[in-house]
Image (spheres, rainbow, N blue to C red):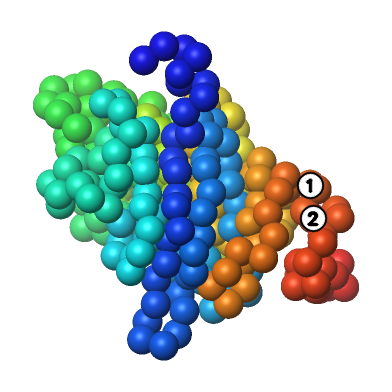
Amino acid sequence: MSRMETLTTPLLQVEHLTKRYGTRIGCADVSFDLWPGEVLGIVGESGSGKSTLLSCLAGHLTPDAGRVIFDTRDGPRDVLAMGEPERRRLSRSDWAFVHQNPRDGLRMGVTAGGNVGERLMAVGARHYGDIRAKATDWLGRVEIAAERIDDRPSAFSGGMQQRLQIARNLVTGPRLVFMDEPTGGLDVSVQARLLDLLRGLVREMGLSAIIVTHDLAVVRLLADRLMVMKGGHVVESGLTDQVLDDPQHAYTQLLVSSVLQV
C-alpha cells in the first residue's frame, strides 16, 4: 500500500451500526470514520448508548445490523464477518481495550511483569529475558517502579492498577485502543495524573483511540473529535473544542451547561 493510499484510508469505518435489546435501542444507525492517529470521544449520560456502541465496535457484543471495517495489515476487512480465531488475533495484536475497572483487564493472580509479558507472549514473544526487560521498560513508562515487577496487582492502588492495565494493553503497539471510562472511579488527583500519562502515550505512539466517558474534561484533553449520544442516537458530532464551545443540539447544550454549573 502506498503512502498516499494510507493517508486516504480510514483506520476504522463504521456503517449503520445498530443494536437492540428487545424493544429498547442500544445504539441506532451509527456511522463514522476514524483516521490513523485520531482520538474520538463519545459522550452522553448513562443509558445514552455509548457503552453499547463501544462493546459492538470492540466485538464484545454482536450488533443487529451494520459493518465495522478495519484497515488490517492485509487491507480493509469487515470485523463482524471474521471468524472468532481471527478476531481474537486482532484483539491481541492491533486492538486493545482499557476497562473502567482495571480488575476486568488484568490477571489479578499474576505478577505485574507477568501481566505485561502475557500480552507479548500472545503475539509470539518467547525469550524470557527479552519479555522481562520489555515489561520492566513499560512499567517505567506508566510510572510503576521496576522493583514492583514481581508484585501482584492486588498490592497496587486503583490508579496503579489502571496504569498497569494500560501497560499491558500498549506493550504490543496496537493501532487502535478502545477505552471505557478510563478515569472513572479514581480520585481527582489520580485522574489528572492518569490523563497526563494517557495524553503523552497517545501522542508519542501515534495511537488511534475511541474513548467513552461521561466526563467532558477527559474528552477536552484527549479527543480530537467528539460524538454526543442520546437514546442510542448520535445527536451531534464535530471537532471537540467546536462541539464543547459552541454546542448546537439542545442535549449537548444541556450537558455542557451542567458541567459549567458544577
- The front one of 156 and 219 is 219
- Please say if 233 is above or below 181: below
Q: Residue at x 13, y 23 (%)?
A: 127
Which of the image's four quarters has the N terminus? top left
Q: Position of residue 78 (x, y in %)?
A: 30, 45
Q: Which quadrant of the figure has residue 99?
A: bottom left
How many residues crowd mark 1 within 10 Å: few (<14), some (14–19), many (20+)?
A: some
- Residue tagged 2: 244
Which of the image's four quarters has the C terminus? bottom right
- The front one of 259 and 244 is 244
- Please say if 117 is above or below 151: above
Task: Tell whether label 1 touches label 2 (CB within 8 Å).
Answer: yes
Q: Residue at x 47, y 28 (%)?
A: 9
The residue under label 2 is which amino acid type?
A: Leu
Q: Residue at x 66, y 45 (%)?
A: 225
The residue under label 1 is which amino acid type?
A: Asp
Q: Position of residue 218 (x, y in %)?
A: 66, 53
Q: Which quadrant of the figure has residue 60?
A: bottom left
